[in-house]
Amino acid sequence: MATAGDPDIITDFIVPANVTTIDGNFFTFTGMRALVKSGPPTNTTTFTAWKAGLAEFQALNGQSVSYDVLYFPAGSINPPHTRVRPTGLLFLLQGIDDIVLAKSFKTEVATIQALKATLAPKP
């Protein structure tokens, strides 16, 4: 049996008071297009995050979602974390996440990293 619910049963989306025209532009967020066109940053050695929440994208009002792009430099890991709701969607654009591999093969992250180190091409 499956059970589902709408976290905001009053509305599906809320039109802000300062918006008079609802068209495709209202539902289109363009703030992250540069990331898609240029790919991941090449000169970044630190963790970088880009965000599109309600303040940046008003069409999200009533949706109970936001968008985040998280850039982890080479060799870094996505630390264990929790969410307020048990939801999340991950798009891995480059490489294979060690945590995903460890869960898939039912082993530890350190084992995966050791295996990847031995399989890496030698310079």
Image (tube, rainbow, N blue to C red):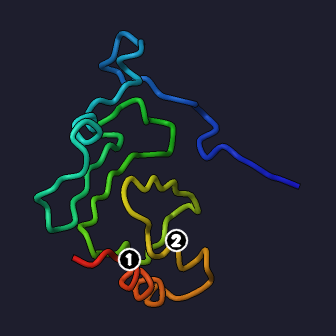
What residue is drawn where x is 57% and y is 31%?
A: 11
**Residue 23 picture location, percent across and down:** 41, 12
From this viewpoint, which residue is outermost toward the front? Answer: 123
Query: What label does residue 98 carry, if any?
Result: none
Q: Nearer the viewer, residue 113 or 103?
A: 113
What residue is drawn where x is 10% and y is 58%?
A: 43
Q: In this view, does 2 lie above or below 6?
A: below
From this viewpoint, which residue is outermost toward the left? Answer: 43
Q: Which of 117 and 59 is in front in this view?
A: 117
**Which residue position holds label 1?**
79
Q: Which of 96 and 65 is in front in this view?
A: 96
What residue is drawn where x is 61% and y is 74%?
A: 104
Which quarter of the image is occupied by the C terminus? bottom left
**Which residue position holds label 2?**
100
**Residue 6 picture location, percent across and down:** 66, 43
Q: What element carries label 1?
A: loop
- Viewed as shown, does residue 59 lie left or right of 6? left
